């Protein structure tokens, strides 16, 4: 036997890689991502109102990053601008897959949820502006109640909807994906401050190189990550919100072609890889740094939730979302050839439309862009409105789930005599 030479030590053992894969698989579950999101927000809220609230504020304000690159940012900003870029990267991958190979590829199937998403943006914004029409400066927050939190909404649906028709989840997913696209456009167009065109144009160079590499099937992180970071940093320097960089990078990834053998694309591969990072790290950390609001006792909580801006946000989320989605869905179904997916009823759509009032992640982000990190009343309104929407939708969808379970059991009972008869004849 020949000596093979000294063995190179492994950084990770097979067991540690297996454990990492198992953890990643857990984080891909919608219920786990939603639970982490809620847990992080609850922890921040408790900490910010504890005797150690100063430590929380100090942590949020801790500045890290190279000042020479204009990236000396506090942790709260890193979470909103940096970590949420990962969230929007994953959302962008999902959005592109839907447009290229999913339900949004066919206009006839996409018409109803796309119209529902549009209605779910227009009506909440209109109700918010109506409720805050006499408040100076409040108009800046018109987009806060227009967003739907995919992770939170799908987690609620997964917990309570064991017997609900699969078409309901598809409807919600398509609506939320289009909603994310609209949120991206709103952030880029309406919440961009001072635009610096040179860094924005410069971002096209690493983006172009990234595009060429992924279309040739390159998956190596050491080649793609520096390019992705360069795109993000240049977009951040341009004044456009840095989360838009995540979407631009996602849209560059091929859905079909470009993979090994040329038969599959990288979009699903990257989405599979980065979803645990988004659901398990990026979104919970953003919620942790964004949701820490000082309540000021019951009097402070009451004052916050009766603030006209907060009332406008809650009305938009709890009432505006279902009104807009239901109205748009009915109009499309009434005056076009588009129809609800088979197996869905209007009561199902009502529960789903209320569930879409869970704004949370993107609503908190837009609230910070509109009013800065000091908009505590807005944050409380987003938290309260999202929780109220989740509870109301949970009641309706739970009742529908029981109805579908009874229908399933009745159908199973009806099949028993026929099966027994067939066995007897045999």
Image (spheres, grey):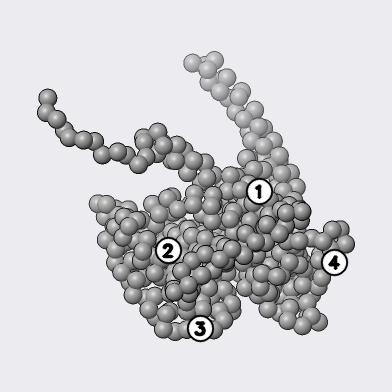
The residue carrying mark 3 is 195
- Tag nearer the camera, 2 or 4: 4
The residue carrying mark 2 is 250
Crowdedness near tag 1: few (<14), some (14–19) or many (≥20) residues, C-alpha within 10 Å: some
Can the viewer see residue 412 in this picture?
yes
Q: Earlier in the sequence, mark 1 or mark 2?
A: 1
Residue 368, x across and y down, in percent: 64, 70
Crowdedness near tag 4: few (<14), some (14–19) or many (≥20) residues, C-alpha within 10 Å: some
Residue at x-position 55% and y-position 79%: 192
Q: Earlier in the sequence, mark 3 or mark 2?
A: 3
Q: Earlier in the sequence, mark 4 or mark 1?
A: 1
The residue carrying mark 1 is 39
- Tag nearer the camera, 3 or 2: 3
Q: Earlier in the sequence, mark 4 or mark 3?
A: 3
Marks 3 and 2 close (CB-CB < 8 Å):
no
Residue 133, x across and y down, in percent: 78, 80
Task: Identify the image quadrant of the N terminus.
Answer: top left
């Amino acid at each position: 036997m020949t000596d093979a030479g000294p063995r190179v030590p492994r950084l990770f053992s097979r067991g540690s890689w297996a454990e990492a894969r198992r953890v990643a698989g857990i984080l891909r579950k919608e219920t786990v991502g939603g639970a982490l999101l809620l847990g992080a927000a609850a922890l921040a809220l408790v900490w910010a109102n504890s005797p150690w609230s100063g430590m929380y504020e100090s942590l949020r304000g801790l500045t890290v990053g190279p000042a020479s690159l204009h990236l000396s940012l506090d942790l709260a900003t890193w979470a909103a601008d940096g970590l949420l870029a990962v969230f929007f990267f994953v959302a962008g991958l999902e959005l592109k897959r839907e447009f290229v190979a999913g339900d949004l590829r066919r206009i006839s199937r996409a018409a109803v949820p796309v119209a529902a998403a549009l209605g779910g943006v227009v009506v909440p914004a209109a109700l918010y502006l109506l409720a805050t029409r006499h408040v100076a400066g409040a108009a800046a927050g018109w987009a806060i109640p227009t967003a739907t939190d995919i992770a939170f909404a799908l987690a609620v649906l997964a917990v309570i909807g064991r017997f609900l028709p699969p078409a309901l989840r598809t409807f919600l997913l398509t609506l939320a994906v289009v909603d994310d696209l609209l949120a991206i456009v709103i952030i880029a167009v309406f919440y961009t401050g001072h635009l610096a065109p040179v860094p924005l144009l410069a971002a096209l160079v690493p983006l172009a190189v990234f595009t060429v590499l992924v279309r040739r099937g390159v998956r190596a992180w050491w080649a793609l990550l520096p390019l992705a970071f360069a795109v993000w940093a240049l977009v951040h320097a341009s004044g456009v919100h840095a989360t838009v960089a995540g979407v631009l990078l996602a849209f560059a990834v091929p859905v079909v072609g470009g993979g090994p053998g040329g038969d599959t694309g990288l979009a699903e591969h990257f989405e599979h890889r980065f979803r645990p990072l988004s659901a398990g790290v990026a979104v919970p950390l953003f919620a942790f740094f964004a949701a820490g609001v000082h309540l000021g006792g019951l009097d402070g909580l009451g004052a916050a939730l009766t603030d006209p801006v907060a009332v406008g946000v809650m009305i938009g989320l709890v009432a505006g979302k279902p009104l807009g989605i239901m109205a748009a869905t009915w109009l499309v179904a009434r005056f076009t050839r588009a129809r609800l997916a088979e197996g869905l009823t209007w009561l199902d759509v009502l529960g789903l439309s209320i569930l879409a009032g869970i704004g949370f992640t993107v609503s908190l982000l837009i609230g910070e862009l509109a009013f800065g990190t000091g908009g505590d009343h807005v944050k409380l309104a987003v938290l309260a409105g999202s929780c109220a929407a989740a509870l109301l939708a949970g009641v309706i969808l739970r009742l529908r789930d029981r109805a579908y379970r009874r229908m399933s059991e009745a159908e199973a009972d009806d099949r028993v005599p026929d099966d027994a008869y067939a066995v007897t004849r045999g």
